[in-house]
Image (cartoon, helix red, strand yellow):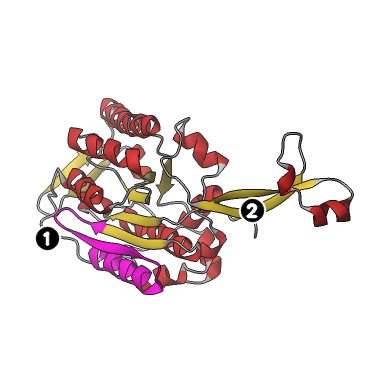
Amino acid sequence: MQLTDVNTPARGAYANLNELIALRFPAKQLQLGRRTRALSTLAGPNKSNFRGRGIDFEEVRSYQPGDDIRTIDWRVTARTGSAHTKLFREERERPVMVIVDQRSSMFFGSSHCFKSVLAAQLASLFAWSALNGGDRVGGLVFNDHEHQEIRPRRSRKTVLALLSQITHYNSSLPANTAGDQDSFANTLSNLRRIARPGSSLFLVSDFRGASQGRAREHLFELAKHTEMTAVSCADPMEFELPRAGTYAVTNGHERSELHTGDRDLRERYQQRLEQQHALLSNDLLRLGVPLLTASTDHAPFTLLQNYYRDKRR
């Protein structure tokens, strides 16, 4: 992947390991260390559960009444002729966990790429950016029936192991595509077991099954002790049925026809999707968890740049 490709949508039915590795270059333009104002708005008024262990210099600005005089930058003050003060932010020693959904429902896309490929590229950007920021990086990759854990380490080898697992799961769609209805809740249960308090979690999924009682309970418990960010992967066709016509559809075992010319069917379909999205949004908002929506027809890097752009670059 060339660097010029990062502003275009992901492409393909399967993730490519070399492309995921190449995303380490644009990931340098992202900074995951703190929530921007846009992310804070998405998360609502709830305070972060994370506690830092120190402070780190961030920038210099004009002195304002009430600022601690001990933080005045005398060099800048002498050079400009007006008082300036240093600003600091929390220095965060934290494990970062990237959770990547590769269930059968993610193997869908109407244009450019499957949701599973979109999730793989988003996860790669998160992982490389966290490593660049000096954080310990790990993850959890799961499908309908199994999962693989990567323990957090401050190591390039660990990120490569995570990306290798993502591509392995991505290329190994189970023959039984019926899926486990409790797979999402089971994944969150496993995540509660391995995620240490204060961890930063990036959950990349289509959130199928997130409205079930067990899944909502696990999300609640995770949000109490970690700083979680949810990234919902979607495809344009999921929000609106294709234009009126007759389409052949299959689940891998059975084949049938879908008639999309029925106005009532189209309205019910759209209402159901809107209700599911609203339920997820409201649940996460109450927990103080930002929800980002990624689409297969938009570049994953551009989405993350809107929220995590490194202003120092």
Q: Earlier in the sequence, mark 2 or mark 1?
A: 2
Q: Which residue is mark 2?
A: 58
The image quadrant of residue 79 is bottom right
Q: Secondary structure at mark 2?
A: strand
Q: Position of residue 110 (x, y in %)?
A: 34, 51
**Residue at (40, 32) in percent of width and height:** 285
Magenta segment includes 159: yes
**Residue at (34, 70) in percent of width and height:** 158
Q: Quadrant of the C terminus?
A: bottom right
Residue lying farthest right?
81
Q: Which residue is mark 1?
A: 175
Of 66 and 209, which appears nearest the observer? Answer: 66
Lateral position of residue 306 relative to residue 50, left or right: right
Q: Position of residue 245 (x, y in %)?
A: 28, 40
Sort mark 2 into few (<14), some (14-19) or many (20+) by Cα contacts within 10 Å. few
Mark 2: amino acid = Glu
Q: Is residue 95 visible?
A: yes
Any mark on residue 57, and which?
A: none
Residue lying farthest front?
70
Lateral position of residue 211 relative to residue 227, left or right: left
Closest to the camera, between mark 2 and mark 1, is 2
Sort mark 1 into few (<14), some (14-19) or many (20+) by Cα contacts within 10 Å. few
Q: Which residues are magenta?
A: 141-170
Q: Secondary structure at mark 1?
A: loop
Instruction: For marks 2 and 1, give the CA distance.
Output: 51 Å
Of 290 and 16, which appears nearest the observer? Answer: 290
Mark 1: amino acid = Ala
Lateral position of residue 60 relative to residue 159, left or right: right
Q: Position of residue 182 (x, y in %)?
A: 15, 43
The image quadrant of residue 96 is bottom left
